[in-house]
Image: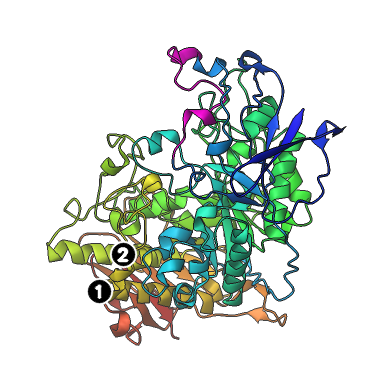
Amino acid sequence: GVELCLFDEAGNQSRVRLAELTHEIWHGFVPGVLPGQRYGYRVHGRWDPWTGARWNPAKLLLDPYARAVDAGPGNDYSNLPPEVYGHVRDWPQQHIADTVRDDRDSAPYVPKGVVVHDDDDWADDRRPKTPWADSVIYELHVKGFTKLHPGIPEELRGTYAGLAHPAAIDHLVKLGVTAVELLPVHQFAHEDHLLRRGLRNYWGYNSIGYFAPHAAYAASGTAGGQVGEFKRMVRALHAAGIEVILDVVYNHTAEAGELGPTLSLKGIDNRGYYRLQDDPRRYADYTGCGNTLHVVQPHVLRLITDSLRYWVTEMGVDGFRFDLAAALARSMHDVDMLSPFLAVIAQDPVLRRVKLIAEPWDVGSGGYQVGAFPPLWTEWNDRYRNAVRDFWRHALPDVREMGYRLSGSSDLYAWGGRRPYASVNFITAHDGFTLRDLVSYERKHNEANGEGNRDGTDDNRAWNCGAEGETDDEGVRALRRRQLRNLLTTLLLSTGVPMLLAGDELGRTQGGNNNAYCQDNEIGWVDWSLLRDPAWKALFELTSRLIELRHRHPVLRRRAFFSGRAQTADGLRDLAWFTSRGSEMTEQDWYAPAATLGMYLSGRDIPGRDERGDQILDDSFLAVLHAGEGPVSFVLPGPPWAERYEVVVDTSLEEQGEAPGVEHRAGTEITVPARAVLLLRVAG
């Protein structure tokens, strides 16, 4: 049986037994329930962990479909007392603790669902509907982006209302990004091991409510006002031409493994919602978080797709980035690109029209699936990240990998009929070093996480420019700033969809912490005071200028892969590669160690048509990337490629105002400074 539990303002509880059972679903009608009502469920059944049955009516359970969650004082997971566990957490024999039922009432200690009245029809909202090829994504944390912003009223900092504030949106508009990708905003919980160390889950990859905006990010309180506040944030971003993409975690929940708490699904139907091992007492774990949702089960698949549609149709979001998406694509054990989850998404009339981004791996066997997802999907391309990091620290054995990544990764995506925008190009993300730390540290410094610096990856592919961490050596500092300019310029000139990490354009640092998932403090927050430093303000202005350049020139955001074939009788091609000698690269050149690469992009025959149906024509560009520690002579290619070149970007310059307007004749031997990118426009 199932009981609905209603709570008044004082926390007093009344229970209503659900009397109807249809198609194995308990249901009922309770008259007089109004918006703001706090509630939960108790589910009665067998306690037999040896067969995977973990029903315990002493535990109040959060409604998986709750539209809002009351996570006020005493209910915000600021502690996890033993009462919230279905088993006796502190049983002396820990190896069997999960088999001993705990009959203490958990209701005083767990969040409750909140009934929400919602009649918003979004009639005044206009979605930007930015085409994939024109998108520039900005990954941010709602709290971390707004918490220290001086232009946001203090009472709104760290909230959805803070992100909707004109001061926050003004930065995004000036930068020129077309979409924000929000780290998880589904209601989430804090892990017990963090709370015991005085820390909290900051990133939010520990979901427990797939329909509810995380209550701690609401300035309007937790009695249901967070829903309207989130919608107003989406509207404000849409009005500025910015799409909203949610980072969603449907692969696991905050209930962890057999020793985790009982908060919702575990107490509703443990065997139905979670993948269990051959020993049903244990959980299959493809996520590294203790459990994995059993997505092939119809009711689990329905829960996920109902949630996705709700966020699109009722909350106004424009797309999703799926954390550990390979775990969702597993049919029984293996990753299957014909899995029920992917098939349902492909035919859904709502979901197939929004932006879908896969993190194309999980931690299980065969989980690395970069390039394997079907059409409609884009992917975080970690091979792009690795190649660019290695090139600029001069660690690539040759430039073949770099050539593929700069030109849209056709080796990964063309074979399946996908387009260059299937590749979400990134150098940094929330997980790992910030861009500034990437050029300031070679080793992780995660001591503040309390795990003995064992957490976080050791494969950082970083170069500290000669000193570990902060330094007073101005030569090292100047080199680091140049490397930042090189990395950002490379990202924004590459074919594909660029993604920036919030604060990288300001030189944000986490002090070398490459796993700041539990740092809800100045380590994890964006430091806006950096804009007062002329050097970091110049980095922001360069980033903004590069994004504007990308928006203005369709040759930098192609919708189809380059052909490499001659476009005209004189041999001009849409893409050509050059050595520093000014000659086209041969097969031997691709296999040879090299620090210098020239990439020619022709704007004369770009596939597709503009909004009027006319052929797309653009300027042509030559990008010269030089990662060597000394300057190099580079011969500018002559006809048919160009008669003259005009310098557009020169990352060797701290201030970019000097660069535009400098012209060179084709055939000229120019000097490219050490560790620099030159972008030259074909002027004739």
Q: Earlier in the sequence, mark 1 or mark 2?
A: 2
Q: Residue furthest left?
A: 473
Q: Which residue is mark 1?
A: 533
- Inspect the magenta stretch and tell me whether residue 362 lies in it: no
Residue 484, label in figure: none
Is residue 149 visible in the rendered structure shown here? yes
Specify whether 34 is left or right of 378. right
| x 68%, y 32%: residue | 42
Residue nearer the viewer, 684 or 497: 497
The residue to which callout 2 is attached is: 507
For mark 1, give the secondary structure.
loop
**Displayed quadrant of residue 487:** bottom left
The image quarter in which residue 299 lies: top right
Give residue 654's position: percent from left, percent from top: 25, 75
- Who is closer to the viewer here, 622 or 294? 294
Colour pattern: rainbow
Q: Nearer the viewer, residue 563 or 159?
A: 159
Amino acid at the residue labelled 2: Gly
- Is 445 above or below relative to 670? above
Which region of the structure is painted magenta?
A: 79-96
Q: Is residue 642 above or below residue 287?
A: below
Marks 1/2 in contact by CB < 8 Å: the verdict is yes
Residue 128 % position (x, y): 64, 72
Q: Main secondary structure of the magenta part?
A: loop
Q: Secondary structure at mark 2?
A: loop
Quadrant of the image for the C terminus? bottom left
Give the crowd class for mark 1: few <14, some 14-19, many >=20 residues within 10 Å.
Answer: few
Q: Disc 1 to disc 2, how far (Cα)? A: 10 Å
| Residue sitting nearer the eye, 570 or 474 | 474
Question: Mark 1 is on which residue type?
Answer: Asp
Q: Position of residue 380 (x, y in %)?
A: 52, 51
At label 2, counting other C-alpha atoms closer than 10 Å, the crowd grade (few under 14, some 14-19, many 20 or more) is many
